[in-house]
Image (cartoon, rainbow, N blue to C red):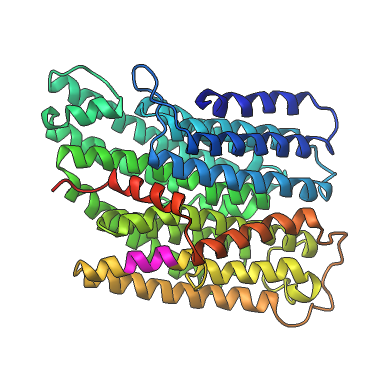
Amino acid sequence: MLAALIILPLVGAAVTWLIPFDRLRPKVLSLFALAHLGITILLLTDTPPESPGGWIHLDALGKIVLLSTSVLFLFCAIYSIGYLFYRRERSNRVLCVGLLVCLSAASLVTITHHLGLMWVALETTTISMAPLIYFNRNARSIEATWKYLLICSVGVALALIGLYFLAYSTIVARVEPSLLLDDLMRDAGKLSSGWVHAAFVFLLVGFGSKMGLAPLHTWKPDAYGEAPGLVGAMLAGGLVNLAFLALLRVYQLCLATKEIAFFQNALVVMGLVSMIFAAIFMARQADFKRMLAYSSVEHVGIMAVALGLGGKAIFGALFHILANGLTKGVLFLSSGNIHRSYNSKRTDHVRGAMRRLPWSGGLFLAGFIAITGSPPFAPFISEFTIISSAFIQGRMLIGAIFLISLTVIFIGMALTVLPMVMGEVPSDSETTSYRDTIWTVGPPFLLLLLVFALGVWIPAPLMSLLKDAAALLEVPQ
């Protein structure tokens, strides 16, 4: 069953490549996405033991990221049926194949405990998504694609250097060389402290660039701004969580080596810097898709701060994986609809979206309310848990900067979103063929219902899973 998570999307990619009809490929994509989610649910309820050698093992941390990724992918796949109907001027073969290859690599990231194999899988997600950013095939999209490839590949290369340092620390310590997480944690007390510190720095910078932590975030505004809405949703709600899972693995190793304070302080600093950057650049943003990119910078910062705080904030960080990922799906899919209707991402052209597109405009507004941490949506639960943990721990300065950043970001987003969705449609607005359909508004609407439901009630199995995952990241007493 674990192998099926990887093999099934690859089979789907091959089938999709061979299909000659553009209209049929999104439907096949959706079928394979549904099958993947079915396998994921089966694995969550009946998890197999780790593979011989320990390379493959689905633990609680991997389960959370796998569930979030699979759910978001399914809704993006269903959305593609309606979206690609309006993009018949371009072949969707590369788009559908790339999404399925990315899903296969993402699944491998969640189930492997070998850090080298995890690195290969993460790099595969980077490469498979690059052609999708170039879907619109214009000068801005090619620039965004190269910037994404360059910065993310350099970041992942730095992470590879960190893995080399980590492997060399085992040689210096005269223990069995290995990049298996379980082996490294077992021998953590014997590893060379200097090489381990160097490894942690490179791994944080490398995986942090993949997440988009400031100041390593510069690829995000261009990539998110130029990619189709469903690709942006997978970047912001899917790939970000995979990079965060890699940091969680590093965090586990830091716990075992007793060097956790060093790593936590670095996470808090980078997290707060990300939130401050987002607050500055989100104010009066003229491109609403770039605004969503800076929102992603904010939320990876929130997760980094929570991980750095430790304690009960860990639970908030893990729940935020789901809350942020699903809410980003609502925002990017509905923003894609608005973009199609107005044929513009500029806020001076997009006005009165709720009049022209009542469903998409309303979903975008609701997504804004949710992503800014307003009750009763799921991000409120995770952000409140993190903030309260900071003050309970006596980290008043961190809590204050966190709250101020959230406030400024809320105001900045409101100044962009409210004029977009309210008021009258400009008289000179371009008329396009796009109309809301069940295929284009159904997926973001169902995602919004999930975000609302998780803000009101966390099911017992999910709560148990979150607690089990948090236990893996607790500081030993």
Q: Does 436 appear above or below 44?
A: below
Count every numbered label the image shows and give the total: 0
> Which stretch did the figure color magenta?
381-387
Residue drawn at x 66%, y 47% is 76
Q: Nearer the viewer, residue 200 or 369?
A: 369
Q: Does 265 appear above or below 63?
A: below
User: Taking the image as drawn, is residue 331 in sight?
Assistant: no
Would you say 256 lies left or right of 349 here? left
Q: Nearer the viewer, residue 441 or 102?
A: 441
Magenta span includes 428 = no
Q: Determine the image quadrant of residue 270.
A: bottom left
For this orientation, the residue located farthest to the bottom is: 423
Would you say 372 lies left or right of 245 here? right
Q: Where's residue 22, x and y in %?
A: 83, 36
Q: Where's residue 357, x and y in %?
A: 78, 69
Residue drawn at x 27%, y 28% is 182
Residue drawn at x 78%, y 38% is 27
Q: Nearer the viewer, residue 341 or 361?
A: 361
Would you say 355 lies left or right of 388 here? right
Q: Does 406 appear above or below 447?
A: below
Magenta span includes 382 = yes
Residue drawn at x 59%, y 23% is 7
User: Taking the image as drawn, is residue 39 in sight?
Assistant: yes
Q: Where's residue 18, x and y in %?
A: 78, 23
Q: Main secondary structure of the magenta part?
A: helix
